[in-house]
Amino acid sequence: MFGKSILLGVAMAGSLGGYAVAKDGPIRGTIDSVTRSTLNITETNGAKISVALLPGVTVIDVVPGSLRDVTTGTYVGTAAMKQPDGTYRALELQIFPASMAGVGLGTQPWNLKPHSTMTNGTVGGITNSTGTVGAVSKTGALSLQVNDGAGVKTVLLPTSAPIVTFEAGSAADLKPGAHVMLFPKVAADGSLSTGRINVGKNGLVPPM
């Protein structure tokens, strides 16, 4: 994610333009339509919602990432499932630009899947079945040692886990069919708004 990963769980109810607005954030879905001030979105569960765009909304493109960009000192985020042995099996991996180092530091509950977590932290080591992995030739399943500020988490990264990074986007990227993820603000009347949107570039579905 690009922006804070710490969530405040909020229950929302009401309607806006025929779209229900009952939701615990973050929101994930596909844009149905867009105006200068509003996104109409179908969530991944099929629910339809409207989200008002705050003035100067920031659009962040989610683009494919590469393990070649992960080395000691890289700041990453990963949605994962905690395993019985205390390790975390990654569902995906996000590589943050250097300017975002420190954002959302920590491990907390996440709602990608039941019992999933989100860990943001700094990579301190990378290993695979043959030992330490170099900076440019990483293939196969890996184990990352990630310092989340409270300690070191062992994150198992299977080859099936998608890897993404982030680029500056623009309002032109907000178009019908684009896949988005965002953290809504909730007004007293239950309506939703946002000043920051993650949008998958060229059809990519943000995996977080």
Image: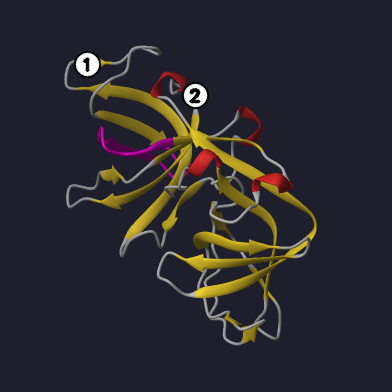
Relative to 98, say whether 135 is above or below.
above
| Quadrant of residue 128 within the rendered picture | top left
Relative to 189, say whether 196 is above or below.
above
Tell me what residue is drawn at x 57 percent, y 86 percent.
Answer: 13
Report whether 51 appears left or right of 73.
Answer: right
At label 2, the amino acid type is Gly
Residue 177 percent location from the top left of the image: 53, 54
- Pointer 2: residues within 10 angstroms few (<14), some, or many (20+)? some
Residue 137 percent location from the top left of the image: 33, 12
Relative to 3, say whether 28 is above or below.
below
Report whether 115 appears left or right of 169.
Answer: left
- Pointer 1: residues within 10 angstroms few (<14), some, or many (20+)? few
Tell me what residue is drawn at x 51 percent, y 59 percent.
Answer: 30
Q: Is residue 155 magenta?
A: yes
Q: Which residue is mark 1?
A: 131
Bounds of the magenta segment? 147-163
Of callouts 2 and 1, which one flags the residue occurring earlier in the amino acid sequence?
2
Q: Is residue 93 magenta?
A: no
Task: Give the spatial CA distance, label 2 vs label 1.
Answer: 18 Å
Residue 178 percent location from the top left of the image: 55, 51
Disc assigned to residue 87: none
At label 1, the amino acid type is Gly
Report whether 112 appears left or right of 197.
Answer: left
Of residues 32 and 6, the one drawn nearer to the viewer in this rendering: 32
Q: Which residue is mark 2?
A: 73
| C-beta proximity under 8 Å, tags 2 and 1 | no
